[in-house]
Amino acid sequence: MSSKRLFYSLLTLAALLVSGCDIDIGQFFFHPTVEERMADNLSGQLQVPAPVLVNPDSFRFAMFGDAHVRADRTSLLEWFRTDAVPKGIDFFCVLGDLTDEATKDEQEIAKAQLDSVGRPYYCTLGNHDLYQAGGWEWFKTTFGPSCYTVVIGNRVKLLFLDSAEGMLGQDQFDWLELELGKDDRLVKIVATHFPLYDGTKPIMFRMPSTEERAKLISLFARYGVHSMVSGHLHGWRYTRINETNHFISAMPPGHMDYDNPGYVLFTWAHDSLAWERVEYELDAD
Amino acid sequence: MSARLYLVVIAAICAVGFAEPARIRPDAYLGFRYEPGVETRLLLAGGAEWDFVERAKLFGGFAVGAIDNPGIAHYGIGVSAKVVDFAKVRLQAQVNHDEWTSWQVGENRIAGMVVTEPLRRLELGIGLAWRAPIYDPEQYHSPFKWSSEAPEWNWVYRLDWTFLTRDGFRVALWLANLDRLTIHNPQQFPSGLRASYAAWQHWRLTAQIGTAIKGLSALLFRFTEMDLRLGVSGEL
């Protein structure tokens, strides 16, 4: 095959691959970078979500990633509402990929479905939320910063990180180390989109840089991080590294790579934090 | 103790190789690696390849770092054997240890590759690596600890094309996530240019520039790493 023919064949293949979706493929290369987003996050111009008021001796919250709300309203947020609210959650956290392709319709439906759960919630950014030119603008004006901390009941400190591109960047690393160094008496949970570890198989749904993962795990050990909860991989994974729990808990409406969709339910009681996995039974459909 | 054992093996390779001076290729380089927010590291590395029999070679290397994570950085040894004359098909295996002293993290790995040279000056290779990161601060420096909380298989690959050889210069393009001392995750597509110049009889000045991407699985691509190396290599 001549090189010209090969080039046009590949171009046709690429066109076929993207023709079935509304993704703005220019964003693959020209999205707002983590440095630009951190400049917004640290500017003081964005409204940081307020801490939820809870009973400091007993409270519950749920965490999951990858809601992937679609324009046809497909999502598991309705199941989440009927399952988690009766369990007495005080709030919940969505760890990126709120939308599937970040179109305007999806953004509006995602916001409406998250509001409809009827509990306060915190969000951070995922890669799918940046698949349209206005993705970051929508996120920051709707939910506030993608990197921030919230202290719940003077017991738990949630550190939300922006790892939408699979990296943190200089400013966010500096910010993270500063925040981890504060509030020693609090239980610290890192919440972000990209996991640090996704199992032994040669797949790619974790932070790619060996050094970046090593540095984060070292920081978690030094500052006694209780858990890191993430998504990105459409599956369920639990790994314990040093004293830190690493969860991947995704809740997309469609195909799962490993296990069922679901969320991690944290319960603060008797001065300690416990967790359990809550699964959505795909067979129930 | 463990690093010393590797050094002894590497020294033995060099020593035996120097006894057979036509069959050794020593090299050394000063490297600079920069990954924003993560690491800025100077590396001083050295090693050698030794054609210990007609169809096989041993290789080894050692690197120490400065600035971030000072001290031992990488060491490893390997063997490569030609198994098929057609397209110069070789089997290669190597065992490596990495350390990041400030973070108290290490990694041991073993990698195997099939490497071929289908065209002159074009080398292609593919294989698998078993990686065992060590996050235990008490044991991260051990090259003998192979149990890990987060082990993983990685695809490894190499494409190396020397596209210019003229007046003592050689210039090559490379795309490889495994070299004698370091590994990248396969989705980072580490790549760059390498050049060398025959400055003296049997010795070449070498230079390499490389980068790698992040965000393949996010489909949000960024070049986020710079790797520069300047050194010498011998063909004794």
Image (cartoon, rainbow, N blue to C red):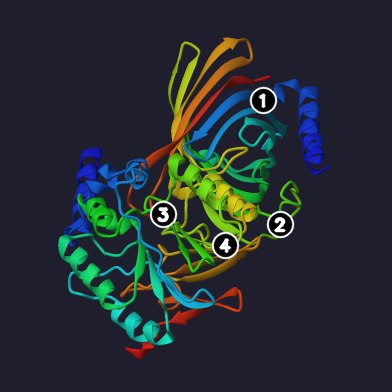
Query: Which mark's residue is nearer the viewer, 2 or 3?
Result: 3
Quadrant showing the C terminus of chain A: bottom left
Give the structural element (helix, strand or loop) at label 2.
loop
Mark identifier at residue B25: 1
Q: Residue at x 37, y 62 (%)?
A: A50
Q: On the image, which quarter does residue B162 sit in?
A: top left
Q: CA distance from mark 4 to mark 2?
A: 34 Å
Residue A189 image offset from top left, x and y in percent: 52, 62
Amino acid carrying mark 4 in the image? Leu
Mark identifier at residue B146: 2
- A235 lies left or right of B137: left
Mark identifier at residue B210: none
For label 3, the residue is A148
Q: CA distance from mark 1 to mark 2?
A: 31 Å
Query: Which mark's residue is nearer the viewer, 4 or 1?
Result: 4
- B203 lies left or right of A166: right
Residue B217 image offset from top left, x and y in percent: 38, 54
Q: Residue at x 59, y 50 (%)?
A: A219
